[in-house]
Amino acid sequence: MTDTTDTAPSRPAIARLTAALPFWVSLLLLPVLWIAAARGGAWLALPPLLTWYLFSALDAALGLNTENADPMTEESQLVWYRLVTLVWPPLQGATLFGLIAWVAPSDHLDTGEKIALFAGMGVISGTIGINYAHELMHQRNRWERRLGDLLLAMVLYGHFRSEHLHVHHRYVGTPRDPVTARYNEGFHRFYPRVLRQSLVSAFEAERAMLARRGLPWTHHRNPFWIYWGLQAAMLALAALLGGWAGLGLFAVQAGVAVWQLELINYVEHYGLTRKHEGHGRYEHVKPRHSWNASHTASNWLLINLQRHSDHHYKPDRRFPLLQTYAEEEAPQLPYGYPLMAMAAMVPPVWRRVMNPRVRAWRRQFYPEITDWAPYNRGTLPLPR
């Protein structure tokens, strides 16, 4: 008879590791960047091809995953899920600055190839890095929040933490939220608007919180000092390693990363608004106020970000515990984020796909509202 005394206790741990492994798939994208940097040419197309197109194809092959984990699962059972978000920041930093140190002064790639390489780096630091920063910034653990700040500093978008936590989550689906894309607002109008308004709203939110404590915005508790300091350090390091070329390549990846983030922001709430109940009051946030997607592969890549309906409903849930919803509770995207983001870049295609779904959502959840014009224009009273 085989003695299973030593092996039996390890089975739950092995099962947890096996369940978490698909969410580690993002790490495979980092070696792809190094291969592209070494080979150049057509290899430079690999990062966006694998990130956008491969996972869209895998979604089509694997279909939906509508299973929900027990939301009461203890934190100690989530070690392998948390670990991927903790190891990513140093790996991304090593890849970003390692590539700058190698590529900026080298002559094995021409200028166009270098720009293409760092655009591909931006696809990764935007799709994965900012997404992991989003997970980390929501945690109570100070060190996880700092790791999130480091990832955002790598793309010069540190204020996203303040905007997301203090503006977006509070005001989503109302005129006060810059990130909620309005019905019929194309991405190319949304993008410059959100770049401007989200920075201002983030700073104003932090200044207002300090003012309530009787402190000026210049006080050291203003996290913008952290954002600015970390971003300055990132720029200095890029310049030290690659000179002016290093700074330029760093800026290319940061620009592409921010564009990726705001594409996803555009998709997540397009046309969805909370009901105005009068006198500046809006209904509470519900799962119906975010687009939900249960596509298997892209949720592996994006650590369940597409279960966005539950994230806004329960923002403190770690990603493996996020729940998915049926059509009766939350509106459903027809495809995962990678394909939807590509559609968003072509406004006529986007409107053809999404406008009928927004109108159906309105009929389903708010049949009593007959005049949607103020919602479309964003001219309702600002929430109190």
Image (tube, helix red, strand yellow):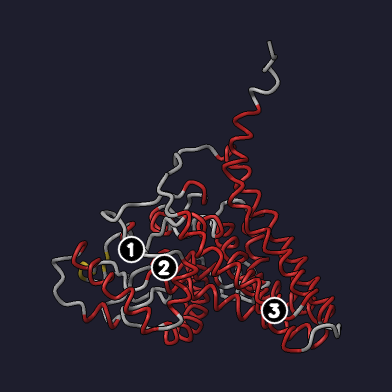
Q: Amino acid at mark 2?
A: Glu
Q: Which residue is under mark 2?
A: 268
Q: Which residue is under mark 3?
A: 42
Outermost residue, top direction?
1
Q: Secondary structure at mark 3?
A: helix
Gap in angstroms between the C-alphas marked 1 and 2 = 9 Å
Quadrant where the C terminus sits is bottom left
Where does residue 228 sit, x and y in percent of width and height? Answer: 66, 76
Q: Nearer the viewer, mark 3 or mark 2?
A: 3
- Name the residue: 52% across, 56% down: 297
Q: Are marks 1 and 3 in contact (CB under 8 Å)?
A: no
Where does residue 30 sit, x and y in percent of width and height? Answer: 71, 64
Left or right: where 318 falls relative to 252: left
- Viewer-proximal residue, 277 or 336? 336
- Name the residue: 64% across, 69% down: 125
Q: Amino acid at mark 3?
A: Ala
Q: Are marks 3 and 2 in contact (CB under 8 Å)?
A: no
Q: Earlier in the sequence, mark 3 or mark 2?
A: 3
Q: Nearer the viewer, mark 1 or mark 2?
A: 2
